[in-house]
């Protein structure tokens, strides 16, 4: 896996999957900038991985994203790989879902991811090389009760990723998605045991996935081993959904 010294920006770095992404790319010797909104967790990442850079940034501040990418590009002296991992949930049944909560999820999950891609691609075009991996979700394919906003945002990521892949393939820029199912994180650890049993009964593998299951796929797509893969979605869900 030729990821040594590759210049990588990872959003949503402080969550369970984000932590696994940082560990994976750090083990490969990549140059990493980890971003998030929780300063304490970012500092903890820096203590654990002294070689990485950390940047606190609110993705909903769309008017600052272009300048943020400029800052990242300068700090890393380039940008080879972007991993859009950040996202939020504000769940409710559709008839109770407020327009504000619909819009906030769209702003952070969908619009921010698009803008990060847009301005990253402008940098990647200079070197005629780049890899973008957008983290979506199984519910972007299946839908989910109480998650109309989240599912729509994740489905949108898949659609715009395909469009970007078509637009920039000839410039040697690959845009792909990784779609996790139910992954063992702090969030899933809080699930009621009875509901967890029901959930596991729907997963053919019979277990939740790990953060490493996701980061393995992201690392593969970021490497030259995946140079002829573009506009695709890798599903990491234990067989719960098959496209």
Image (tube, rainbow, N blue to C red):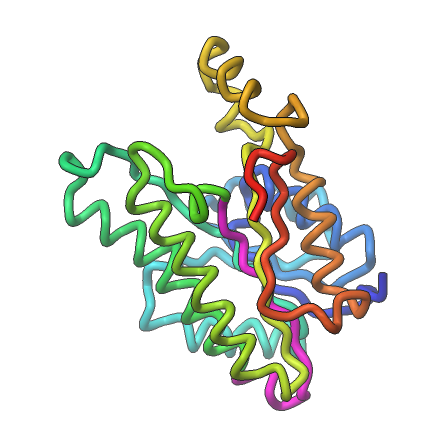
Q: Is residue 73 magenta?
A: no
Residue 212's x, y, as percent?
Answer: 71, 40
Residue farthest top in this picture? 194
- Is residue 54 found left or right of 26 in the rendered image? left
Which contiguous range is marked in magenta? Answer: 122-137
Taking the spot 55% from the left edge, 43% from the top edge, the residue there is 14
- Is residue 60 found left or right of 36 in the rendered image? left
Residue farthest bottom in this picture? 126
Residue 200's x, y, as percent?
Answer: 57, 20
- Residue situated in front as seen by the camera: 48 or 165: 165
Residue 135's x, y, as percent?
Answer: 54, 53
Taking the spot 42% from the left edge, 68% from the top edge, the residue there is 114
Quarter of the rendering containing residue 101: top left
Taking the spot 64% from the left edge, 88% from the top edge, the residue there is 170
- Is residue 16 found left or right of 218 in the rendered image? left
Q: Is residue 179 visible?
A: yes
Image height check: is 44 above or below 205? Answer: below
Q: How many marks?
A: 0
| Quadrant housing the N terminus | bottom right
Q: Is residue 43 visible?
A: no
Image height check: is 33 above or below 208? Answer: below
Quarter of the rendering containing residue 124: bottom right
């Amino acid at each position: 896996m030729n990821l040594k010294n590759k210049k990588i920006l990872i959003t949503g770095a402080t969550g369970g999957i984000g932590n696994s992404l940082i560990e994976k790319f750090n083990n490969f010797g990549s140059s990493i900038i980890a971003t998030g909104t929780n300063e304490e967790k970012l500092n903890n990442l820096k203590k654990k991985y002294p070689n990485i850079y950390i940047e606190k940034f609110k993705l909903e501040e769309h008017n600052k994203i272009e300048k943020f990418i400029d800052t990242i590009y300068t700090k890393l002296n380039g940008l080879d790989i972007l991993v859009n991992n950040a996202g939020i949930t504000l769940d409710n049944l559709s008839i109770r879902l407020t327009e504000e909560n619909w819009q906030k999820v769209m702003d952070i999950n969908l619009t921010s991811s698009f803008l990060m891609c847009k301005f990253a691609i402008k940098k990647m075009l200079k070197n005629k090389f780049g890899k973008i991996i957008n983290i979506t979700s199984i519910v972007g394919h299946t839908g989910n009760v109480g998650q109309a906003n989240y599912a729509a945002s994740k489905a949108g990521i898949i659609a715009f990723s395909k469009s970007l892949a078509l637009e920039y393939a000839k410039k040697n820029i690959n845009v792909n998605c990784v779609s996790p199912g139910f992954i063992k994180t702090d969030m899933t650890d809080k699930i009621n045991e009875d509901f967890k049993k029901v959930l596991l009964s729907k997963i053919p593998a019979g277990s939740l996935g790990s953060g490493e299951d996701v980061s393995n796929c992201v690392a593969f797509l970021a490497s030259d081993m995946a140079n002829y893969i573009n506009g695709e979605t890798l599903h990491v869900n234990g067989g719960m959904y098959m496209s």
